[in-house]
Image (cartoon, grey):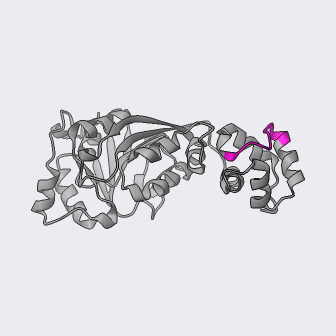
């Protein structure tokens, strides 16, 4: 671990009283920003553990809140970049994280600027993302992370249990969301977090979702665009056969679609939710989208 770190970052992380911090600043959780703070210490530790942070790592945290998770990351990583959109919470963050000299606080919207500008220079170009994010930005954040040329090697997020299960679905229950994540990496659920471990308590339970990015799957933007243009057409009417949804969605004659699916080794009568990622890649390569 970097010798510049304070002693506070080298031992066990003491509990943080989130409610007291907010009351002391005259603040209440903002529903408009989806603020549900993870306050149970065992759950915080489980999120940090799922990220498998090493002393050489750079960690990007999205929605740092009052620093509950940030302190766990700072105790394990070489460097932490904590992003927070709420200016009032940034003030608290600066106070809570003052003992940690390996933390950089960025005030702003993670979706509004390039990741490489936020994270900065990273040895070897690799970094990890770990965060308790607002539910309403889950899809946007994941898409931003996996589609960026400056991708993390691992992503660990607290998300709604149902969303995590959809992302990790196997062929037979695939969705466009699952395909979008599994195209770039391997998702897995590393634990469940009950709603009462948050403040305020949300309406649903959460899960710890981990996505290990496939370093060999550095697809080009053109390949990804082609794949998801075809997949969006395929998933547009999930109950219909693939040959019909692709023909209608892409504006390509049925005979041409059937020929392309045969070339890809995929039965034209199958439905979109039954295809695995590699099958979608073959279909996208075989079906012409010039007129889509």
Verify whether residue 207 appears in magenta.
no
Q: Nearer the viewer, residue 232 or 68?
A: 232
Quadrant position of residue 35: bottom left
Which of 85/134 is in front?
A: 134
Quadrant location of the C terminus in the rendered image: bottom right
**Depicted 222 relative to depicted 42: above or below:** below
Magenta-highlighted residues:
262-272
Instruction: Tell me the quarter of the picture where residue 189 sits.
Output: top left
Q: Of residues 214 and 265, which is closer to you in this image?
A: 265
Residue 101 shows up from this direction? no
- State left or right for residue 2 relative to residue 283: left
Q: Is residue 30 visible?
A: yes
Residue 230: x and y, percent?
Answer: 72, 53
Location of residue 78 in the rendering, given as x and y in whole percent from the top left corner: 32, 39
- Total of numbered circles in the picture? 0
| Rendered location of residue 138, percent (x, y) | 44, 54
**Residue 127 at x, y percent in the picture:** 43, 42
Q: Residue at x 78, y 43 (%)?
A: 269
Tell me where residue 249 sits by quadrant. Answer: bottom right
Residue drawn at (35%, 64%) of the image:
108
Residue 291 appears left or right of 95: right
For the point 56% across and 37% down, the residue is 214
Nearer-the-camera pick, 16 or 97:
16
Q: Residue furthest front?
A: 239
Q: Does residue 267 belong to the magenta stretch?
A: yes
Check the picture and name the quadrant holding the N terminus: top left
With 273 as the anchor, is 212 left or right in this view?
A: left
* Residue under the point 18% across and 33% down: 12
User: Which secondary structure class fits the magenta region best?
Assistant: loop
């Amino acid at each position: 671990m970097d010798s510049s770190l304070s002693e506070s970052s080298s031992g066990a992380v003491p509990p943080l009283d989130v409610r007291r911090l907010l009351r002391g600043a005259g603040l209440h959780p903002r529903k408009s920003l989806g603020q549900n703070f993870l306050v149970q210490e065992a759950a915080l530790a489980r999120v940090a553990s799922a990220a498998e942070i090493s002393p050489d790592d750079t960690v990007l945290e999205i929605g740092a809140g009052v620093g509950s998770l940030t302190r766990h990351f700072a105790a394990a990583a070489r460097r932490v970049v904590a992003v927070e959109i709420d200016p009032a919470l940034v003030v608290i963050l600066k106070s809570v994280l003052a003992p940690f000299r390996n933390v950089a606080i960025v005030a702003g919207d993670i979706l509004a600027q390039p990741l490489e500008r936020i994270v900065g220079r990273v040895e070897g170009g690799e970094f990890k993302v770990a965060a308790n994010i607002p539910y309403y930005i889950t899809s946007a954040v994941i898409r931003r992370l996996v589609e960026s040329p400056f991708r993390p090697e691992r992503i660990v997020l607290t998300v709604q249990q149902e969303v995590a299960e959809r992302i990790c679905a196997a062929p037979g229950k695939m969705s466009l969301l699952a395909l979008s994540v599994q195209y770039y990496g391997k998702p897995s659920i590393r634990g469940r977090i009950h709603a009462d471990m948050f403040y305020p308590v949300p309406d649903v339970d959460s899960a710890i979702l981990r996505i290990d990015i496939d370093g060999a799957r550095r697809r080009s933007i053109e390949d990804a665009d082609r794949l998801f243009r075809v997949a969006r057409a395929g998933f547009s009417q999930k109950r219909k056969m693939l040959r019909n949804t692709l023909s209608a969605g892409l504006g390509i004659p049925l005979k041409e679609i059937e020929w392309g699916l045969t070339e890809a080794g995929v039965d034209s009568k199958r439905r979109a939710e039954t295809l695995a990622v590699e099958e979608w890649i073959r279909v996208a390569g075989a079906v012409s989208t010039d007129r889509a």
